[in-house]
């Protein structure tokens, strides 16, 4: 209504400052969800890159030797870890390892090198899908070793779930029919067993000691780099001349995303969520391995393989849930890759 035609005695109302259209609350809601579950999303990202690492490694094994691939990966990872360690030490400090801590870190670096050698050799002789599924048996093996160490046996349902996962492995490696597993499958199973020993030993050797996590990981990374270089100097030299730009991008991806990024996210997330939740989210790694191996790698499982994959994932998840309840939710995450 025009000002001149307003009835007298009634003051004019100030112009409304309300916008004509209300902005959508979707962006703010999305931002709230991201802030609330940022640790979960990052942990799923770690599981995704780990699941993709098997196909990435298999591609590299077509162009270079096992130890040359590992040497180039861990040389790059070592450089990045040195930078991370230096920055962390300058900003927040890092507990000194001492003589015992250094010995523990070197020992863990040697066992990690054995595991990575078996994994890389194994994935070169089997499918990336099989490799990602079989290595996930670490989730089943590790609690058994911890129970033996602690002399506190797990409940019977755990072993039923573990048996389901083992049957799944048998079906997975059978392919289109019953036959002996390939050498690659055997190597991946061996890597899963040794990784279980590695994870259990890590927990026992570091218990009660305030070793810096970044320092421990840095020493492990350096030990792996030195060992892999010494094991194949000619192969590493050849890689510098034969690897294509695409190959080096894959090596960089394995070093930065699958090694350094994965470690730092775990270190950050474990302080913001429960260990059980970390384990649950990282446990999706074999699912990503199947999805990526089949969709991007063009790998075929067959109906027995799909049944086996489903049993491995279901058995692993069920056994993990039983262990979580049995230990009161205090279940450390089982890292699949360094």
Image (cartoon, rainbow, N blue to C red):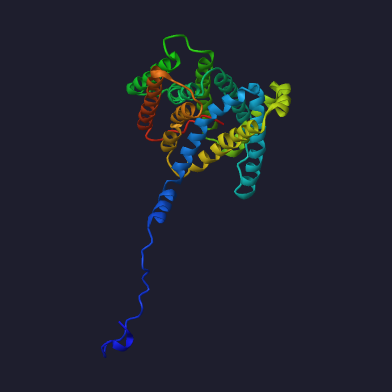
**Horizontal and vertical percent for residue 165?**
39, 21
Relative to 34, is 174 above or below? above
**Horizontal and vertical percent for residue 188?**
52, 19
Residue at point 38%, 73% (across, down)? 17
Question: How many discs appear?
Answer: 0
Q: Quadrant of the N terminus?
A: bottom left
**Horizontal and vertical percent for residue 323?**
38, 29
Work out which residue is located at the far top of the displayed protein and give it.
Answer: 179
Residue at point 52%, 31% (across, down)? 52
Residue at point 29%, 87% (across, down)? 5
Horizontal arrangement in the rendering, residue 247 relative to residue 174 (left or right): right
**Horizontal and vertical percent for residue 269?**
48, 42
Work out which residue is located at the far bottom of the displayed protein and give it.
Answer: 8
Horizontal arrangement in the rendering, residue 179 relative to residue 54 (left or right): left
Relative to 188, is 251 above or below? below
Horizontal arrangement in the rendering, residue 114 relative to residue 47 (left or right): right
Camera-nearest residue between 154 and 250: 250
- Residue 99 appears anywhere in the view: no
- Residue 160 appears anywhere in the view: yes
Residue at point 62%, 50% (across, down)? 91
Relative to 18, is 78 above or below? above
**Picture quadrant of residue 206:** top right
**Picture quadrant of residue 96:** top right
Q: Quadrant of the C terminus?
A: top right
């Amino acid at each position: 209504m025009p000002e001149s035609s307003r009835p007298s005695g009634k003051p004019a109302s100030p112009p409304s400052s309300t916008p004509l259209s209300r902005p959508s609350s979707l962006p703010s809601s999305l931002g709230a969800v991201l802030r609330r579950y940022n640790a979960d999303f990052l942990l799923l990202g770690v599981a995704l890159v780990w699941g993709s690492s098997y196909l990435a490694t298999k591609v590299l094994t077509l162009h270079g030797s096992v130890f040359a691939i590992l040497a180039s990966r861990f040389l790059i990872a070592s450089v990045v870890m040195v930078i991370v360690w230096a920055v962390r030490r300058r900003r927040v400090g890092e507990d000194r390892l001492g003589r015992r801590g250094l010995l523990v870190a070197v020992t863990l670096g040697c066992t990690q090198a054995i595991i990575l050698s078996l994994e890389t050799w194994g994935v070169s002789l089997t499918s990336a899908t099989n490799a990602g599924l079989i290595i996930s048996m670490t989730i089943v093996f590790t609690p058994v070793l911890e129970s033996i160490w602690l002399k506190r046996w797990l409940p019977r349902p755990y072993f039923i779930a573990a048996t389901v996962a083992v049957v799944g492995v048998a079906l997975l490696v059978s392919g289109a029919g019953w036959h002996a597993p390939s050498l690659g499958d055997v190597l991946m199973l061996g890597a899963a067993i040794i990784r279980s020993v590695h994870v259990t030993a890590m927990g026992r050797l570091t218990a009660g000691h305030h070793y810096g996590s970044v320092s421990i990981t840095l020493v492990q990374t350096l030990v792996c780099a030195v060992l892999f270089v010494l094991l194949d100097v000619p192969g590493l030299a050849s890689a510098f001349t034969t690897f294509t730009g695409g190959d080096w991008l894959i090596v960089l991806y394995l070093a930065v995303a699958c090694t350094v990024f994965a470690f730092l996210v775990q270190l950050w997330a474990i302080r913001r969520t429960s260990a059980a939740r970390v384990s649950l989210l990282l446990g999706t790694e074999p699912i990503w391995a199947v999805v990526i191996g089949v969709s991007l790698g063009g790998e075929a499982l067959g109906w027995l393989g799909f049944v086996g994959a489903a049993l491995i994932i279901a058995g692993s998840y069920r056994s993990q849930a039983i262990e979580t309840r049995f230990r009161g939710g205090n279940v450390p995450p089982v890292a699949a890759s360094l």
